[in-house]
Image (tube, rainbow, N blue to C red):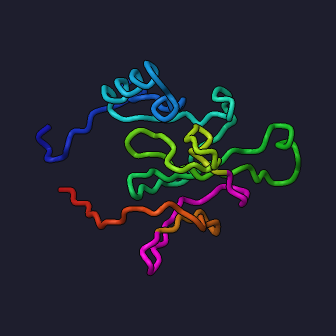
Amino acid sequence: NGDGKPDYPDYTEANLYDATANNLGQGTGSVLINARNALASAHGWYIRLVASDGVTYEGEKVLAESVTADNVVNFTTFTPVASAQANSCAPSQGVGKSYSVSLTDATPVYDTVKDGVYLVADRSQVLTRTGIPPEPTFIFTGDGKMVKCVGTECDPNPPKPKMFRSYWYQN
């Protein structure tokens, strides 16, 4: 463009792969093949924040920054209380969740349900703390472990990551 600044293309949902259904993680046969082809021809992916039925929107939204570590995108969400409780004079505490998904295809990376299968439900865990959760942070312990924390809630048994230093440089 001549001004010395990079030109970034404008992408919309039409340019991205909808990974909401987790067909790359749960699909088989032609469903899996079609999902792989769709992701390969897309310019990235997105997931819709829908209820456990996979269809209903409950107002869940991302309100804090994401953190990517060991090729896992980590972010938190907040869902306000149901409308019946919203008429109360008490403050709305809502529900917070912590998500961890693969950077490359949005599949779950941890078996949070502990059933041996990586389902849509494994993308997130409900936080015990109410209210709007902060962004995830990582603590690197002296023995080489990485612990993911959201506020005061830390995962006592995180998966063992492959840690390496990386640097960002941009002109």
Report the span colored magenta: 126-145
Query: Quick check: 171 left or right of 85?
Result: left
Q: Considering depth in this image, is 105 or 2 the residue closer to the camera?
A: 105
The residue lying furthest to the bottom in this view is 142
Query: Quick check: 86 left or right of 117?
Result: right
Q: Position of residue 158 (x, y in %)?
A: 53, 62
User: Which residue is at a point 57% across and 65% down the rendered structure image?
Assistant: 157
State the image quarter where residue 80 is shown.
Answer: top right
Q: Position of residue 87 (x, y in %)?
A: 86, 42
Q: Considering depth in this image, is 148 or 60 the residue closer to the camera?
A: 148
Q: Is residue 12 above or below residue 137?
A: above
Main structural element of the magenta stretch: helix, strand or loop?
Answer: loop
**Quarter in which the N terminus is drawn:** top left
Q: Considering depth in this image, is 42 or 105 the residue closer to the camera?
A: 105
User: Which residue is at a point 88% across and 47% down the rendered structure image?
Assistant: 88
Q: Is residue 97 above or below residue 54?
A: below
